[in-house]
Image (cartoon, rainbow, N blue to C red):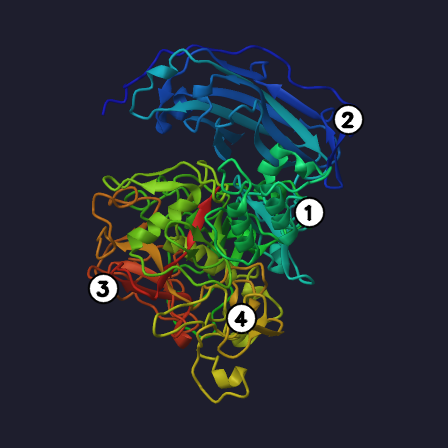
């Protein structure tokens, strides 16, 4: 189609306004965050604009294509200098945003680049989908050493959609660029060099309290992750609920509240309590929304108290907190597992080097050298100079790369996303729940019996995504069930994303580097929960050892069976030994449950070995098999996409270096820990990872196999999230 479609004449004017406020020394005011002080300074920052102005203004809008941004977008070049002898942490924002509502959308973009010696490196990007807000935070905590200067270039542009955009003609936009410096970061950073987690709207950072056994709201300004300690960053989403039923507002929903409604319904004298007011009674007691608080509402409150399902999403009766309560809660507030509907773990961008045993099966694989990269900077070697068999070079992992521009022959043939990423969020457990309302939680049965296309479509639902069944286009509208917005992408895990987790686990930042494990126990323990009659498996369970080393008679001394699994597994994700062949917790045995995580701590990712065998979006040459896809509705198209890897070459189940993608944990780590190693091919075109609960020693994070993509009771899947 002609690229000139919908092009408009644009007039760009820039008004010269100075945007700095001169302060005093290093403390013009104090910003308080949950007890932490962050001194703000502008006196020691110099912000210079090439044209003398801090304001961008467009008096006309012209849609452009992404490949035209560098030449046609509105730009602003500026320099920031730290003139003090102290390290400052600088935030950059756009303030005083003035734009018509039509422009406050995901199609109106900003891209911020750091410029050095004529080259540009993307720092961050986003859009102006800000609603009624007039301020947009572009980036926080840019480190400026004493007397350091950095140069930036900001691009602002409207995306061409090849649809009618005439309604945008004549609209205008203006905003002021503002920089602020702080003596401390606005969010916690560990010393590993890992990128700070990017929380999507709706995500709440959490830490685990060993004493209470609860996940709690994290203090973002204190240590809530530490990759040097194998504490990977964790976050959750919270179900929203009707905060009703607590009529007397005593903090619990109980029989007393039911009695109050019943007495009110029959007209008994109430007294001087606030709930005696009719409006208050309706607000707190009308569960069904039929305009009256009556016996039907009492019924549903009673069911909620008993832990039974109701058609109304009532808050936990014991701790009636909704999503807003948790989002505004103080650090340390416990989060009921009942209120959590998904759990995520942050995998920061990194480059890696495998020092030996590439493509060679070994029961004692080496530690993978991992170096975290800052922002979206790519410091690893190019693929042409760092082949899949090389042991000497560092390569930026493809899960974080822009696969539309970094490839061998065609876009995405080496994996990647459609932009450079600072990191990805990965489901902490195998997916559970239902096809309509999936969850990611421990101690529940995995979601199974779906074709790969159904699993893919289910994974989109966390962020309200849908796949066009005609052309495969994926779009997101947000999902209030989880609080995630349309700016978030959730999708079924790819092989390269699986590899990013597996490699980090095999590094000093994962279980390989955890000093609490040695020898064969460096391998991730198997999830050995399963029932051969229906392949029911439970998320987060552990056999207490690597696959092949977990006989029943070695765990339960009063049992003689040498079988390697039970219906419920041996241990829970939080280290409790289950009473034999029951789902009831017994004594706590430190390290036996958390040993099944990628870190050997509770902060890692579970079910990477055993449980269900996990379908991934690794595909042979666009072959649909029994997946439920068609060649026309592959996610993003059958010629390659950010949503799947398309493997080509000689069709065979054998793994070879020429077919594999560097970083996908197939050829490079083939048969590590004696894990099974097979590749998708023409008649079995889809990949699966991790192995089953009964796969014994062949299961593991480096397990790979092929399948048709059909629905089967033993196949599950995992979800990745791009904030």
Q: Position of residue 707 (x, y in %)?
A: 27, 63
Describe the element under mark 2 as helix, strand or loop: loop
Of the two numbered discs 3 and 2 in the rendering, the one whose residue sits closer to the viewer: 2
Residue bearing mark 2: 28
Left or right? Give the position of 692 relative to 203. Answer: left
Looking at the image, which is closer to me, 155 or 544? 544
Mark 3 and mark 2 lie on one chain; the one further toward the N terminus is 2
Residue in view at x 21 percent, y 43 percent: 632
In 3D space, how far apart are the residues under numbered discs 1 and 3 (Cα atoms)?
A: 53 Å
Of the two numbered discs 1 and 2 in the rendering, the one whose residue sits closer to the viewer: 1
Q: Using the rendered view, name the quadrant where residue 275 is placed.
A: top right
Residue bearing mark 4: 522
Mark 3 and mark 4 lie on one chain; the one further toward the N terminus is 4
Dot label at residue 331: 1
Circle 3: is it few (<14), some (14-19), or many (20+) Cα within 10 Å? some
Q: Using the rendered view, name the quadrant where residue 27 is placed.
A: top right
In 3D space, how far apart are the residues under numbered discs 3 and 4 (Cα atoms)?
A: 32 Å
Q: Position of residue 546 (x, y in %)?
A: 48, 74
Circle 2: is it few (<14), some (14-19), or many (20+) Cα within 10 Å? some
């Amino acid at each position: 189609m002609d690229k000139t479609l919908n092009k408009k004449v644009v007039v760009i004017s820039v008004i010269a306004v100075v945007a700095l406020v001169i302060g005093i020394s290093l403390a013009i005011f104090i910003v308080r965050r949950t007890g932490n002080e962050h001194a703000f300074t502008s006196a020691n920052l110099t912000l210079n604009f090439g044209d003398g102005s801090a304001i961008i203004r467009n008096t006309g809008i012209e849609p452009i294509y992404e490949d035209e941004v560098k030449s046609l977008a509105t730009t602003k070049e500026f320099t920031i200098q730290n003139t003090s002898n102290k390290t400052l942490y600088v935030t950059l924002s756009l303030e005083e945003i003035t734009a018509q509502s039509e422009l406050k959308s995901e199609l109106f973009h900003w891209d911020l680049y750091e410029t050095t010696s004529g080259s540009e490196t993307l720092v961050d990007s986003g859009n102006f989908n800000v609603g009624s807000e007039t301020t947009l935070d572009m980036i926080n905590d840019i480190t400026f050493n004493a007397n350091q200067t950095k140069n930036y270039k900001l691009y602002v542009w409207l995306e061409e959609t090849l649809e009618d955009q005439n309604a945008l003609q004549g609209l205008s936009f203006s905003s002021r660029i503002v920089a602020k410096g702080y003596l401390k970061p606005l969010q916690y950073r560990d010393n590993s060099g890992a990128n700070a987690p990017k929380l999507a709207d709706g995500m709440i950072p959490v830490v685990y309290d060993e004493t209470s056994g609860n996940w709690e709201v994290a203090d973002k300004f204190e240590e809530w992750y530490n990759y040097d300690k194998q504490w990977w960053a964790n976050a959750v989403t919270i179900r929203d609920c009707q905060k009703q039923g607590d009529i007397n507002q005593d903090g619990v929903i109980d029989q007393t509240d039911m009695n109050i409604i019943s007495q009110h319904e029959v007209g008994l004298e109430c007294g001087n309590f606030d709930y005696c007011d009719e409006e208050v009674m309706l607000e707190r007691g009308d569960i069904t929304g039929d305009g009256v608080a009556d016996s039907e509402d009492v019924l549903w409150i009673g069911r909620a108290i008993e832990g039974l399902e109701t058609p109304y999403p009532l808050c936990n009766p014991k701790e009636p907190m909704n999503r807003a309560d948790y989002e505004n809660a103080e650090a340390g507030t416990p989060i009921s597992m009942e209120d959590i509907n998904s759990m995520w773990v942050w995998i920061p961008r990194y480059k890696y080097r495998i020092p030996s045993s590439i493509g060679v099966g070994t029961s004692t694989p080496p530690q993978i050298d991992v170096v975290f990269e800052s922002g979206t900077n790519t410091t690893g070697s190019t693929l042409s100079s760092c082949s899949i068999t090389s042991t000497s070079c560092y390569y930026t992992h493809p899960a974080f790369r822009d696969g539309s521009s970094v490839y061998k022959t065609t876009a995405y043939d080496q994996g990647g996303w459609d932009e450079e990423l600072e990191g990805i969020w990965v489901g902490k457990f195998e997916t559970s729940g239902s096809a309509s309302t999936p969850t990611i939680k421990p101690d529940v049965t995995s979601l199974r019996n779906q074709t790969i296309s159904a699993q893919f479509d289910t994974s989109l639902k966390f962020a309200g995504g849908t796949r066009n069944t005609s052309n495969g286009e994926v779009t997101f509208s947000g999902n209030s069930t989880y609080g995630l917005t349309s700016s978030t992408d959730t999708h079924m895990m790819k092989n390269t994303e699986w590899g990013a987790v597996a490699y980090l686990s095999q590094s000093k930042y994962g279980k390989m580097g955890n000093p609490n494990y040695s020898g064969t126990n460096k391998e991730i323990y198997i999830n050995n929960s399963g029932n051969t009659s229906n392949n029911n498996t439970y998320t987060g369970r552990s056999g207490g050892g690597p696959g092949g080393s977990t006989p029943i008679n070695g765990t339960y001394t009063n049992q003689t069976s040498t079988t390697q699994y039970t219906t419920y597994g041996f241990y829970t994700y939080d280290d409790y030994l289950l009473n034999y062949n029951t789902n009831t917790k017994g004594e706590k045995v430190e390290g036996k449950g958390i040993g099944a995580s990628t870190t050997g701590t509770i902060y890692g990712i579970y079910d990477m070995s055993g449980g269900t065998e996990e379908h991934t979006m690794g595909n042979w040459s666009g072959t649909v098999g029994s997946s439920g896809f068609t060649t026309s509705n592959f996610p993003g198209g059958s010629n390659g996409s950010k949503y799947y890897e398309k493997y080509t070459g000689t069709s065979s189940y054998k793994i070879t270096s020429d077919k594999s993608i560097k970083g996908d944990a197939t050829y490079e780590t083939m048969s590590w820990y004696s894990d099974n190693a097979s590749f998708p091919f023409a008649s079995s075109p889809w990949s699966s990872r991790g192995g089953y609960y009964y796969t014994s020693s062949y299961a593991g994070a480096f397990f790979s196999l092929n399948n048709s993509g059909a629905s089967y009771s033993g196949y599950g899947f995992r979800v990745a999230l791009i904030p």
